[in-house]
Image (spheres, rainbow, N blue to C red):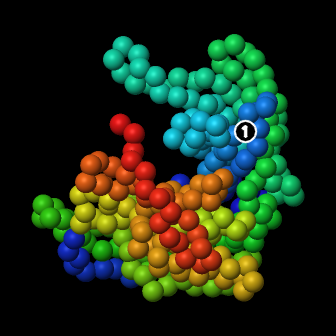
Amino acid sequence: MIHRNLFVIWILVAGFFNATYAQTSVVTTACYRGTVGNYSIAMQLRQQRGNDTLTGSYYYLRSGREKSIHLNGVSRYPTTLAEKVTVEKNGKYVWDTTGHFSVTAPSLATGKLSGSWKSGKTGKQLPVQLQLLAKAEDAPLFYDYELVMHQEKVTHLSQAEQIMTKVTALKIIQEGKVLQTLSGFNEFVGTYPEVELEDINFDGHFDIKIPIAFPDRTKYDGSFLYFIYNPSIQKFIRHQQLIDLEYLFFDPVKKEMYRYDQGPEGFVINCYKWRANEVYLHRTEKMEE
């Protein structure tokens, strides 16, 4: 069944309409680690449930995640992923395809990808072996998700009005039965409301991210609501500390989280780590120009 595919990525308010249970998009981010030939790599792939299109990136561990290479493809047998980098041609930056991955479709039983990589320049091929950095048969992958939403009229600082969608709850469903309802929030979302599944505390279980929007901001106008899956009670728990940190990127290889901020001398990367169920600032890096 498609919903079992592994891969499943502003403010004055005036008036609202009744709550609705519209179609909720579910996107899964799966992270892998392994090798291309003798080179160690980390790969991240995203897929919307019910859609066979894949997007993502990978990087060589010796080069670092800052030098990630873009990927896109289609989930078939075998799955083909084109790697692309931006290059300058005639004064413009364009995508250039530099190689292709051809790998077996992910197996829920093993969580492995295997196949080959082929250079777009020389035609050279190297074997590929990748292992999922989460549990392939994790329960959250098989749940259905339904956001409770309504529409509100928003008046921007420019006095322009817009009808936007707000979410107030998330129903987590298994075979038609509601297992849990997450509530206690009332946030704006984008044009396409969705739920993202990703292992954000690096314990091998997929957690929930709900993308939200801040229509009153001119920058940093998007973030997430974060809910951590507790396998012992099979429930998702709201994580307020992550919510307060807002927009974060997660690296399961280094087990770090990154927040990009404006510092006194330019942009900086604040790197966080987990300590038990809390996060702490591990280091701060200056972004390269």
Q: Nearer the viewer, residue 232 or 103?
A: 232
7 lies left or right of 210: right
Most extreme residue toward the right is 109
Q: Secondary structure at mark 1?
A: strand
Q: Nearer the viewer, residue 150 or 55?
A: 55
103 lies left or right of 212: right
Name the quadrant of the C terminus. Answer: top left
Q: Which residue is mark 1?
A: 40
Task: Give how far across and how far down residue 62 sits, in percent.
Answer: 64, 37
Give residue 24's quadrant in the image: bottom right
Task: Give how far across and how far down residue 256 sits, in percent.
Answer: 57, 59
Q: Nearer the viewer, residue 57 or 41?
A: 41
Residue in the picture at 42% in, 82% down: 185
107 lies left or right of 275: right
The answer to whether residue 134 is above or below residue 231 is above
Residue in the picture at 66% in, 19% down: 120
Most extreme residue toward the left is 159
Task: Give how far across and how far down residue 117 sits, in percent.
Answer: 74, 28
- Label 1 Cα crowd, 10 Å radius (few <14 / some 14-19 / many 20+): some
Q: How many marks?
A: 1
The answer to whether residue 102 is above or below residue 33 is above
Name the quadrant of the N terminus. Answer: bottom right
Q: From this viewpoint, is residue 19 visible? A: no
Residue in the picture at 46% in, 22% down: 87
The answer to whether residue 231 is above or below residue 5 is below
Task: Give how far across and how far down residue 58 sits, in percent.
Answer: 62, 40
Residue in the picture at 41% in, 16% down: 89
The residue under label 1 is which amino acid type? Answer: Ser
